[in-house]
Image (spheres, helix red, strand yellow):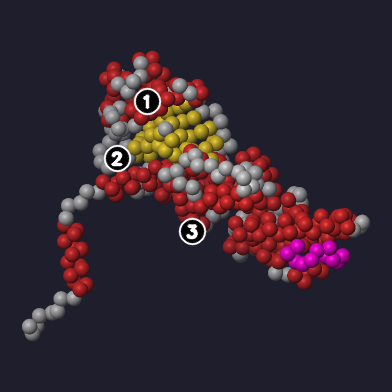
Amino acid sequence: MTGVRPRRASDKQLDLLAALQEVESDATGTRTYERYNWQAKQAVLQWIMAATDPNLIAVVCERVDDLVTVRRDNVTFRQLKTRDRGSWTAKLVCSEGYGIDSLSLSFLSAQRSPLEEYARYELMLEGAPGQGKDTIEFFADPSSANSDLKSRIRSNGLTSAQCSRFLSRLSIRPYQPTRRDIDSRAIRVMMSIWPQLTGPECETLYEALLTSASNAQSSRMSPWAVRSKLSDLMLDSTQDVGDDPFEFQVLSAEKLFRIVPPTAGEPLGDWMSRGRAISDMSNLELKLRWARADSETILRAATLRARADVQLKELLASQRDAVAQLETLAGSLLGVAHAASREIGRRAGTDPGAYSRVGSVVMDHLLSRPSDMNALDRDGLFADVESIVGFLCILSDECRFAWRAS
């Protein structure tokens, strides 16, 4: 056996992998997953528009059609189609399983509902269309469909009149970003909406939004929704948890608002107005989110506020001079807090990390200085530094402190 190299286990593993590579494989499962994931990413692209478009109410996943976009003035049913090779033609998209058949059935369903007046229909296609005359004309104006195309559409159960009405409300959008390019497209759009985010921050936000969209596609309750349900149950154990999957299929403007930061340069007043219109957040939570505080800080602030509120009520009930003393403390406390937020704002260029989470930094700064905080409370109104900062949270809830300099 001299001169023969012993066969190692790793060599055998490599041989088996090499042999496996040569075996013919059906990539249907991989392509199906890619298409499913592409739809979720398209949902994110539609959903994030709610950050700048007050008329966009929600994007609904896998309900009637692949996506349904609900605006204040219309509802758009969307079919999303991918293609591995070749181009799209008018005849192909009117064939069974290529989108228009499903949209025509949605049209019939909408005819029997209050949505009929508001419904629109859209076919979104990955990649390019063909250059044939019939295709170019039909994609530009579906109502110009020739007799063959109309016959294909009527075969789905539409009358001639219904077919004409459906085509007048149909639009076809080719050149959708490919499965390979859609992530970069989404990141570019997000960075245009939130240019204050760093690349890694934008990617983390995109992952969070994509998780929510994927959960909506499968009607799964997302982690934040689970937490919200549990919090609601803690406050009212008699309420119904709810098991309608539709609730989990909806990507609403409110859900987006709870995940994303303010848009670049969005004034506090606009942020507060938007938040009050679509959510039940307190003034304190809205201000902390405007100041880019993290979820841990927001939860801590709510806890400190509740603790201080108990002491505040006891003070007002037991001390005659409490109102004047509290106002004196409020003036001193607000002065220190405003100074801290302004200082962090001045350091934005040299310490962008602190400014990117200024609400959390201000909170940590104040809590880390118990001696200074206790010195402000010359009348000994509150028990400790946490209660004093809790009082600041009450003042913030009363719109007297925003946690970030404007």
Q: Are marks 3 and 1 in contact (CB under 8 Å)?
A: no
In this view, 288 is above or below 159: below
Q: Amino acid at mark 3?
A: Pro
Given the current orientation, which residue lies at the most extreme top position? 161
Can see residue 338?
no
Q: Mark 3 and mark 2: span between their CA atoms?
A: 31 Å
Q: Amino acid at mark 1?
A: Ser
Badge 2: few (under 14), some or many (20 or more) residues near its Cα, within 10 Å?
Answer: some
Secondary structure at badge 1 equals helix
Residue at figure coordinates x 87%, y 55% from the top left:
317
Q: What is the distance, in whole Å, between disc 1 and disc 2 at their CAs?
A: 21 Å
Q: At x 88% / y 58%, what residue is drawn?
A: 318
Q: Which residue is mark 3?
A: 200
From mark 3 to mark 1, how far is it between C-alphas?
A: 42 Å
Give the labeled residue for mark 2.
Answer: 83
Dot 1 or dot 2, earlier in sequence: 2
Tell me which label, 3 or 1, sits earlier in the chain.
Answer: 1
Which mark is nearer the camera, 1 or 2? 1
SS at badge 2: loop
- Name the N-terminal-most of marks 3 and 2: 2
Report the disc number at residue 120: none
Magenta residues, start to end: 377-387
Q: Is residue 254 left or right of residue 62?
A: right
Reply yes or no: does residue 374 show up in magenta. Answer: no
Query: Viewer-proximal residue, 195 or 330?
Result: 330
Main SS of the magenta part reads: loop
Q: What residue do we see at 42% from left, 43% from top?
A: 217
Residue 112: give x, y in percent of width and height. Answer: 45, 21
| In this rendering, the label closer to the viewer, 3 or 1 | 1
Q: Residues within 10 Å of mark 1 (few under 14, many from 20)?
A: many
